Image: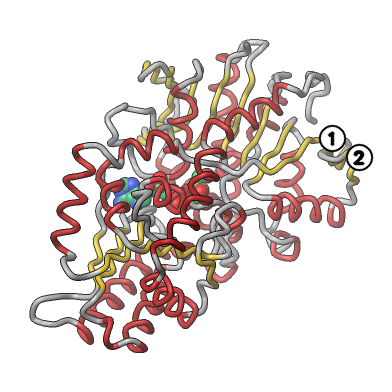
Amino acid sequence: MSRLIVVSNRVNPPTGKGDETVGGLAMALSAALREYSGLWFGWSGKTTPEFTGHLNVERCDGVTVATIDLEESDLNEYYNGYANKTLWPLFHYRQDLTAYDRSYGEGYERVNKRFAETLAPLIQPDDLIWVHDYHLIPLARELRKLGIKNRIGFFLHIPWPAHQLMVTLPGHQKLVQSLFDYDLVGFQTPEYRQAFEEYVLTEARGAAVGPNDLRAFGRTVKVGAFPIGIDAAEFAEMAKSDRAWRTYDVMMAHTAFRSLIVGVDRLDYSKGLEERFIGFEHFLAAHPEMVREVLMLQIAPVSREGVEAYQEIRARLDALSGRINGEYADIDRNPVRYVNKNYRRDELAGVYRAARVALVTPLRDGMNLVAKEYVAAQDPENPGVLILSRFAGAANQLKQALIVNPNSPEEIADALQRALAMPLAERKERWRMMFDNVRREDVSAWRDAFVGALEDIREVHTALAS
Ligand code: ADQ
């Protein structure tokens, strides 16, 4: 079996203690690599005054981890800049927040080159290389320039935007062209794959030359939808651990005579948090009899604090939660509890299990693993109800959730009312079908499907990218 090299911006090796750092991608990759002897390469998260290409190598829980430090300007231009101020907002349909700055593009190219130059000497001829996410789109091109002929796959964790949005990005063609240096390009859903195909066929005047093959820029690439999953069995087990039970008990004690409604998201404008709070406010206004019956707990650890848009959304959410509590709080209770902390995964599992309803209402989301974690953590005899945005990739699979348009406070309010009143039999039936899906299409199935498709590509690259 070939060795697997995983490359991602950040590297979060599994600790096996249930306290891994936040982030969907990190969660998925730790789980995927745990069973695969392989190498995980990426940025250490640290900066250095001058880039040296020095590799920090360690072995963590069966995985060899190799990281590099980057310069402060790399962090500003590549990570905070092109990745998180240009590509992230654009790919999440927030053109209003998208910054186009030439230095960001240059930093992005520079860091991808640095990644390639440091990684190339570690690559053995038979290795499979699996590159992750929007930070590293040009990596294969840089590796090909260095003569790397291995099979290289790319997986995009976030949405691929519609054609008309993509063309607003200066240099969009170069970015898309660099995806043709991969052998396989994977998306979360058929819809995103379709959007990519549409760009290739219309904008790049390419052609579909097989059911999964696109040809453009003089090259052919395989494309596919590979919906990411969670380690469902492990998560369901974790929901029964001592620590999870303790958290569950604490939550139940704090919500005596009330139903817990939970949201768990990185503090990010794509997650629809403001719209969710306003939806909850509508619910309270429309159902005054429910004000004393519910507690909405929103867990939202801060992320990407170096980007202004993230500081602004934080301030707006502080104000909104204050406004709702100001209006509806009583001497013995607040309707909203809003916390910005990270929790251990087993504690989160306990919170999910105690929640009668989960509100997962992103405005756009590649997949959304919280929706799947919530399902996996439920008590089969008394499961809660998932309210899910139609714009989360997960809505493709979790069709028995209450699907809402997150832009409509009325839809969120109606779904809350329906969820809280849902009879046990219906809750069980809906949950059972969702749990089957979460279990079947788990993180191992995702990894096996992607790596299997990459392995099946037999022709090794012969042409070097220009
Ligand atoms: P994210 O945008 O980070 O991931 P998501 O898929 O929901 O979004 O994953 C978040 C992860 O962080 C979950 O595993 C969750 O449990 C964890 N988490 C959130 N809040 C936490 C807290 N307070 N404490 C501890 N853990 C917390 C990106 C894409 C998604 C895609 C994933 C995986 O944006 O669309 O689903 O990658 O591909």
The vertical placement of 210 against 448, above or below, is: below
Relative image position of residue 326 (x, y in whole percent): 20, 84
Residue 239 lies left or right of residue 88; in this view the side is left
Label 2 secondary element: strand
Residue at (75% x, 33% y) in the render:
181
Residue at (59% x, 52% y) in the render:
397
Say which residue label 2 marks. Answer: 209
Is any part of residue 339 visible from this angle? yes
Q: Quadrant of the N terminus?
A: top right
The label nearer to you, 1 versus 2, is 2
**Any atom of ligand 1 within 8 Å of the CB at mark 1?**
no
Is any part of residue 76 visible from this angle? no
Residue at (18% x, 75% y) in the render:
334
Say which residue label 1 marks. Answer: 220
Residue 32 lies left or right of residue 12; in this view the side is right
Relative image position of residue 15 (x, y in whole percent): 31, 27
Q: Residue furthest left?
A: 331
